[in-house]
Image (cartoon, grey):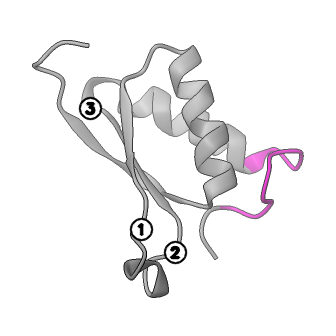
Amino acid sequence: MTDDVRTVYLGQYTHEHAETIAGRLEAAGIVWWYKAPGYLSQVWEHGVRLFVDRTRLDEAKAIADAVLADPRAQGGGDGVE
């Protein structure tokens, strides 16, 4: 990873979906990071927020959409409920 990578918000997902999406982002060589709710903030903040390299946002969105559309993906549904 280079120092000049800037990330943008991809979305907020269940822990299971975030894990699957992250694995596919890594496989595609897309830089990403996450922010999970802390001990107290999990009361009002549900799910994991993912951020990706802004130059590959469209590709990352397609990956996330594919995971959410796959009924075999962990967690079911389409993001945080």
Query: Which quarter of the rendered picture does the N terminus lie within?
Result: top left
Residue drawn 36% across the image and 24% down it: 31
Res 2 label: none
* Residue type (three-letter) at the residue carrying disc 3: Arg
Mark 2 secondary-structure assignment: loop
Residue 70 part of the magenta-drawn span: yes
**Label at residue 46:** 2
Give coordinates of residue 72: x percent, y percent: 89, 45
Q: CA distance from mark 1 to mark 3?
A: 23 Å
Q: Label 1 belongs to which residue?
A: 37
Magenta-highlighted residues: 69-78
Q: Residue furthest bottom?
A: 43
- Residues under labels 3 and 2: Cα distance? 24 Å
- Does label 2 or label 1 sit earlier along the sequence? 1
Categorize mark 3 by other alpha carbons within 10 Å: few (<14), some (14-19), many (20+).
some
What's the amino acid at mark 2? Answer: His
Q: Nearer the viewer, residue 78 or 17?
A: 17
Where is the C terminus found, in terms of image quarters? bottom right
Q: Amino acid at mark 1?
A: Pro
Q: Is label 3 in a helix, a strand or a loop? A: helix
Instruction: Name which of mark 1 and mark 3 comes first in the sequence.
Output: 1
| Total numbered labels | 3
